[in-house]
Each structure stands twice: as C-alpha cells, then as structure tokens.
Amino acid sequence: MSNVPFGSAWAVLPFIPPALRGKEVAPWGIQTRSLPANAYSARIDNFIGELDPGTVIIVGETVDDISLEKLTKVGYAQWVEVLLPFKCYVNRVHFNADSETLRQVG
C-alpha cells in the first residue's frame, strides 16, 4: 500500500453496509480512534469516535499499528492520521480507490 498524500482533503461519504442496504437505516460515516491500534486492542486510552457524512478531513502521516498485537502479527493494520477537524486515526483501507466511505476532494 502506498501512503495517503500528506495534507490531502477527503470527504466522508454516507455509507450503508451491503447487509443493510434496502432497509430503512440512516447512513453513517466512519469510525476513528485516538491511537493507531487495531480492533482487537483493549487499550483503555484509545477512544472510538466517528466522522459524520459530509465532513471534510485533512490527513497527516500514514502510520503502522503500534499496538502489542503487531508483535504477534494479529490484526496488523496501517492507519492514517487525521489532522482536521480533530486529531484521530482512520484505518488505511478507507482511503483505497474502491472504498465507499471516503473520496479525495483536494
């Protein structure tokens, strides 16, 4: 995977998972974390938040998972630092060309 361009702007798209499409559910954005740690991590200092659809984000560096699980290769992931509208981390997969959750706008 290549790094996401530092300082680039991305719009959060409304997303409904395929399993729920066709049902009456509100679309949501994407989950964020306060630290670049994978989903299996039980770290107390890592909050989970959300970026709402329509939010424009400015990204920083692409970083590797720094959690303990990296040492055992369980759930290894790359994360992209979000600088604005608040500092957090988003899983790198959301920045792929086939992602339905983010679109580059600048």
Image: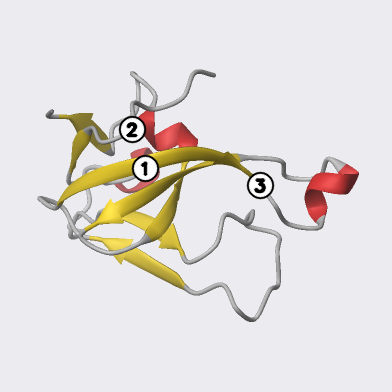
* Residue at mark 2: 6
Alpha-carbon neighbours of circle 3 within 10 Å: few (<14), some, or many (≥20)? some
Residue at left offset 73%, top offset 57%: 67
Disc 3 and disc 1 in contact, CB within 8 angstroms: no
* Residue at mark 1: 60
What amino acid is at disc 3? Asp
Question: Dividing the image into 4 quarters, which one contains the C terminus?
Answer: top left
**Looking at the image, is mark 2 or mark 3 nearer the viewer?**
2
What amino acid is at disc 1? Gly
For residue 39, side relative to residue 32 (left or right): right
Q: CA distance from mark 2 to mark 3?
A: 18 Å
Q: Quadrant of residue 61?
A: top left
Q: Quadrant of residue 12?
A: top left
2 and 16: which is toward the camera:
2
The disc at residue 65 is: 3
Answer above or below: position of 16 versus 106: below
Q: Earlier in the sequence, mark 3 or mark 1?
A: 1
Kindly state the secondary structure of the residue where label 2 is placed: loop
